[in-house]
Image: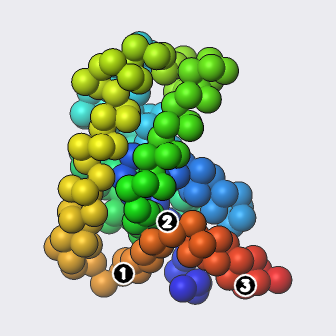
Amino acid sequence: MFDRRFQRVVVVGTSCSGKTTFARQLAQALRFTHIELDAIYWKPNWRERPVEEFRALVEKAVAGESWVIDGNYSKVRDIVWNGATHIIWLNYPFFLVFRRAIRRTVRRIVFQEELFSGNRENWRQAFLSRDSILWWVITTHRRRRREYPAFFKQMGKPHLAFIELRSQRQADAFFLALKERAA
């Protein structure tokens, strides 16, 4: 699972699977830079960054020798995946992802947690909008689980190692193996 090529890691998964938390922990354990694509993409007031600007910022972010990046943006997949050595897919079951989505969303609203660019979630957006992250999880989870194996196969990149984690237990074992490797 770990070798000398373990330098540029992409963490993917459906929304609310825990990509950012996992990537942040991995980057810290490896002492690599953590890059969060959401933080690059979203401008204040939930405005999307223009594609060319987004691509340029991502190219700059992944120019380093070692990093861990989280996110699923197809607009920059070619940039991110071409530079990666490993892709870790958090392929968790729906009930776990949805439970995390609800818990995270409520916590962010109640404590007015600032996300990226000063953005915050609110009750209306979270529970009454078609742009709701909860609705997004419901409508995309199954599709993402079908799409990722096809993406991985289609990429045909021999330099890329794919790691699929299907449960929190497997993710915990992954970090334990990483810790043992470092010892």
* Dot 2 or dot 3, earlier in sequence: 2
Q: Are marks 1 and 3 in contact (CB under 8 Å)?
A: no
Q: Residue furthest right?
A: 183
* Cα–Cα gap, marks 2 and 1: 12 Å
Residue assigned mark 1: 159
Near mark 2 (Cα within 10 A), the count class, few <14, some 14-19 or many ≥20, is: many
Marking on residue 181: 3
The residue at the point 65 percent across, 71 percent down is 172
What's under tag 1, amino acid-wise?
His
Q: Secondary structure beneath disc 2?
A: strand
Q: Relative to 72, is 153 on the left or the right?
A: left
Q: Position of residue 107 (x, y in %)?
A: 61, 29
* Dot 2 or dot 1, earlier in sequence: 2
What's under tag 3, amino acid-wise?
Arg
Q: Compared to 86, does 44 lie above or below?
A: above
**Between 55 and 164, the one nearer to me in the picture:** 164
Q: Are marks 2 and 3 in contact (CB under 8 Å)?
A: no
**Between 174 and 103, the one nearer to me in the picture:** 103
Q: Relative to 5, is 107 on the left or the right?
A: right
Q: Secondary structure beneath disc 3?
A: helix
Near mark 1 (Cα within 10 A), the count class, few <14, some 14-19 or many ≥20, is: few
Q: Are marks 2 and 1 in contact (CB under 8 Å)?
A: no
Q: Compared to 84, does 72 lie above or below?
A: above
Residue assigned mark 2: 9
Q: How many marks?
A: 3
The residue at the point 30 percent across, 43 percent down is 138
